[in-house]
Amino acid sequence: MRAPDRQKAVAMGLALGVSLLLAALPGRAEPVAVRSGEHPGTGRLVFDWSLPTGYRLEQLGDRAMLHFESPGELRMPAKLPRNVLALRGVADGVEVTLRSGAQIRPFRLGERIVLDVLDPPAPRKPEAKPPAREAATREARNHGRQPPARRNGPESAQPAQALPVPLPVPLPVPAPMQASVTPLPAAEQPVAPPLAPAAPAAATRAEPPPGLPVRVLARPGEARVLALPLPAEAGLAVLRRGNLLLVVSDLARPLDLSALRDDPVFGSADLLPLPEATVLRLRLAAPAALRARREGERWLLEPVPALPQARSIRAGQEDGMLVLRAVAPGRVVALPDPETGLPLLVGTVREADQMVPQARRLPQAELLPTVLGAALLARGDAVDFRAGAGRFLLSGAGESAAGPEAPAAEARGMTRLFDLPPLDAAALSERLRAQQAGIASAAPLQRASLRRAAAETLLSLGQAQEAQAMLRLAFQEDPQAGLDPVLRALQGAAALLGGRLDEARALEDAALPRTDETALWQGLLRGARGEGREAAPGIAAAVPVLLAYPLPLRSRLLSPAVEALLAGGERVAARRVLDAGGAVPALAELRGRLAEAEGRRDDALAAYEEAMRGRDRPARARAIRHAVELRLAGGQIDAAAAADALEEALYSWRGEGEELAARQRIAALRQQAGNGRAALAMLQETARLFPDQEAVLRPPMRQALAMALEKDSPVAAIALADANPQLLAADPDQGRLLLGLTDRLVALDLPARAAELLVRGMAGASGEARARLGLRLASLRLESGDAAGAAAALSDGGAQLLPPDLVRERTLLSARLLARQGKEDDAVALLRGLGSDGAEQLAGILAARHDWAGASDALAGLAAAAQGEMDDARRQLLLRAAAYAVLSGDAQRLGGLRTRWAPQMGEGKLSQDFNALTLDPVHGMADLPRLQRELNLFRGFSGRLDELRADAGAAR
């Protein structure tokens, strides 16, 4: 062989040898801790795998082989369960040696593989008893199934044959668990022993003594009462589980229920036999309850429709344990829960009227509501519930988590609705992975409770959308899940956290338990709807529950909770929540609002400035607005500067509710500053952006338009009115706006433009507004000499029912129009019908006809009708009346005026002129000075009369 070929052959041989050696080496084994525990009727072995692995179980008699698909280094427990005799590791799993008759029930919990070893059935007694007693005893120890009932009435005396002990058959494992039981070959199957007749019961043991009789006391006029013959040292507890009322005594006493067989109330009673306790079960539909009271050597149970007030067994914290303080506590009885199969730990009491009114969920246990005593549903292996001096002690339920995120002590005594454990994000994520693995390995109809737990973990992580999706899957898979109000409320909480308020209405379901946590979430829902005043009390009372939440959830709830508390005036609770949140920038704006509410103006402005520098855009926008309002209230800026500042920050955050409120506030500040045109422009832009709010915005838009028409120049005001005909036409105060603008145009000597504006206004007006505009238009046309146009304008809009003042004005203008048309008699008749209201205009028409006496009488009558003190207006009327009397040459009328009015004229030039006109004629040389004054007066009388007429015209 050549050298190159030899080298190649050696290399191939070495490679083959190395590959065979590597193949022979074992793979790296994963360390797997094996934990053990004991429960009533069950021992438990838990294999803590870090990753999911398949398994296969084989059981033959008292030996079982558990094979794993992945290699693992098993670390055996120091103590085995009572029904496991030996535990030995083998090549690919573990060999379990069981107590004779024990059975194994495997299942998967996340990555963990759990073996529940069920206690063997109790040995059969060779006495005449029905096989139901043995089955009940065996199933009572297995908390995964509800024990069969012991029926009322005497037991059968027929002798029973001993049945063969059945071979343990491994329970079927669901397909998703990927576990299978390998059947043994037929040759290796054990052969059951032949049936052997049992010896007669009398030959082996005497008949046991009969049980203590249970009686029903039916007193006239009172309810039926069940009497349990239990001594004074016997403690009792009463609670409801589904349709069952459980009456638990901590003493094992045989009871005879034969007297209850045909009772209409207690006929369904049966016994759950336990070795250390007595459990009586009654099927009474909710909301019926049993009120228990002590009477000598017996407990009396009275059915009631609703429970009366009783002492609550209060919860507190002591040395890291939850303490339930009770009077005369008894013992703790362990029994399987009829609803879930989990261990139910019941604490009895020896005195009546002690109850737990509300349920409370803990990470590893659930405190149940009771009628008497205390009860706990254990969900974890480490739960310890025991009686002490004047209290019950609970530990291992996860209620005393250490670290900075541990809930406050007072929160542990508050009632809960959800299971939101106070863990950090890493622990919650690990818990979620285990829960998702458990869901994947469970059958569809068994996933509802698992999905609920996963949804609670997702909610604790602040993942609202994922939690809601998880619950939707639960509702789709299990039709019973949708009937659970707590499960629907959990979905509502996730929807509220995600901002979907319409889907959060399940939080207000009347069927929900009235717990502190329920009040918290209902308050948060009201606060999100803007009902902060109504939401604040419930949130303030449940602040400890909020602060006990895990950090991812708590950080998302702090802001809405504080906003609702501030809106409702709960400042103390708001400060507590803010202090718990720490100095994070996201809460700076809320700290500023609290400081502002407490009157600390400088601290509030500093907090707002901090929020403006933050990255939270909604909080930054709110901080800007609050700071502007605070400076405006303090006089640092005026309304115009405040409007400018708010408008600059308008687009910092464009949330619908906040932007709409900000725009309305800017418009109000513009109006406050006197800038109606800018306010109108802002409101019109807002109406275009929010068309559904147009009806709300229309009144402030009309107010802004009115201010602009009053403040702007006439030309700009006319242009503004032309640009907003619909807004102006819809204004109920349209007549006042146009009339004011008309007066401004007339003052600028633009009567034609004013008349044109009135014509357009009348086209879009109706009712009283149209009549007023027509009256003003007729007046303008009459003054310009257009009598026909004035008559047409006056007749338009006068057919409907008008207010008295408008009717009077129209009558006066009609009289002027008739006088202008030469129909003076008609005008005089029309004015006389008005009385004092038309007297002044009547005097003018009569004076124009040189009816001086009539004009004087009209003015004197008008002065006499006036009320109050003498003023210059009445003095002018009397002076004109005296002048007309002089012109009439009627000395008697002139004397009458002097007699009536001279004492009231007082002092002043008007009084001197009146006296000069009404004095007696000249009789001698002494009257020459008076005559000189009268001559001077009459020299200027013509001009004075014109002035008086001009004054009267201006008054009209």
Image (cartoon, helix red, strand yellow):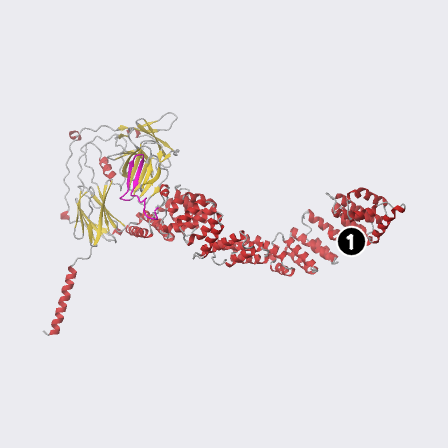
Disc 1 packing (10 Å; few <14; some 14–19; many ≥20): few
Indicate whether residue 405 is drawn in magenta: yes
Q: Residue furthest left?
A: 1
Depth order, front residue of 900/181: 900
Q: Is residue 472 left or right of residue 91?
A: right
Instruction: Kindly tell me whether residue 459 is visible in this rendering.
Output: no
- The quadrant in which the N terminus is found is bottom left
**Residue type at numbered disc 1:** Glu
Depth order, front residue of 583/528: 583
Q: Residue at x 68, y 56 (%)?
A: 743
Magenta range is 380-406
Number of numbered markers: 1
Residue under label 1, please give it: 947
Q: Position of residue 763 (x, y in %)?
A: 65, 56
Q: Residue at x 20, y 37 (%)?
A: 122
Q: Main secondary structure of the magenta part?
A: loop
Instruction: Kindly tell me whether residue 355 is visible in this rendering.
Output: yes
Q: Is residue 24 above or below residue 580?
A: below
Q: Position of residue 244 (x, y in %)?
A: 32, 37
Indicate whether residue 561 is drawn in magenta: no
Q: Is residue 443 left or right of residue 310?
A: left
Secondary structure of the residue carrying numbered label 1: helix
Depth order, front residue of 410/554: 410
Depth order, front residue of 717/391: 391
State which quadrant residue 245 falls in.
top left
Q: Is residue 293 above or below residue 24?
A: above
Q: Residue furthest top?
A: 220
